[in-house]
Amino acid sequence: MIIRTVEHYDLNNLTDLMYQYIVDFYKRPKPPIEKIHNLIETLIEKNKGIQFVAEQDGNLIGFATLYFSFSTTKADKITVMNDLFVVENFRGTGVAQELFKSCETFTKENGYASMSWVTATDNYRAQRFYEKMGGSLGKWLNYSI
């Protein structure tokens, strides 16, 4: 297995993987393919974010997405790991750890003050994983509209 940044030739395979994440895992409506492709192309540029993929035997088996942002309280730039997804039959094999470490390494090596992330309140497996990776529950509540 290798972890690398997404490339143009990954567009179709990554689109399929992202639909598994959005529709199958999170049970959200399927976004139009044009929007998925636009997002992937934006991340390939590495200006607003970056996406890492896990590949084994030519197949994409997971991805992690970092978005670049700022923290007023830190007066510095930060990364937000918005996604960490591994196909079901590869969960528990170390793929998620390698994707997470790639995000963490990128954050540190590129001078970001911190990396943050959120997960669903009922995603206990992810919570255990993040605690194992050294994360701690923050003091902030997340809202959306």
Image (cartoon, grey):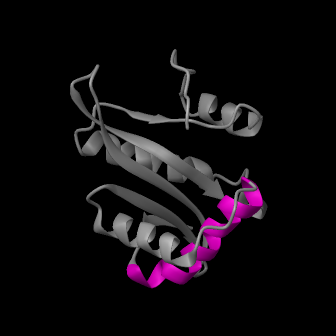
Q: Residue at x 68, y 32 (%)?
A: 127
Residue positioned most to the front: 145
Residue in the image at 67% along x and 60% along y: 21
Q: In the displayed orientation, state which residue is furthest to the top.
A: 139
Give the answer, above or below, for where 143 lies relative to 11: above
- Front one among 50 and 134: 50
Quarter of the figure with residue 80: top left
Q: Which of 96 and 47 is in front in this view?
A: 47
Magenta includes 124? no
Where's residue 134, x and y in %?
A: 53, 28
Identify the residue at horizontal 47%, vertical 54% (top origin): 65
Q: In which quarter of the image is the C terminus?
A: top right
Residue 20 falls left or right of residue 36: right
Residue 143, x across and y down, in percent: 56, 29
The answer to if 25 sits in the magenta stretch is yes
Would you say residue 87 is visible in this rendering? no
* Quadrant where the image shows the N terminus: bottom right
Task: Indicate the quadrant where residue 17 lies.
Answer: bottom right
Up-down relation of residue 22 to residue 96 (above or below): below
Judged by its main secondary structure, the magenta piece is helix
Question: Residue 101 in the image: x percent, y percent?
Answer: 47, 46
Q: Position of residue 78 (x, y in %)?
A: 31, 36
- Please give left or right for residue 142 compared with residue 51 in the image: right
Image height of 127 relative to 33, above or below? above
> Which residues fall within the magenta stretch?
8-26
In the picture shown, does residue 63 fall above or below 8?
A: above
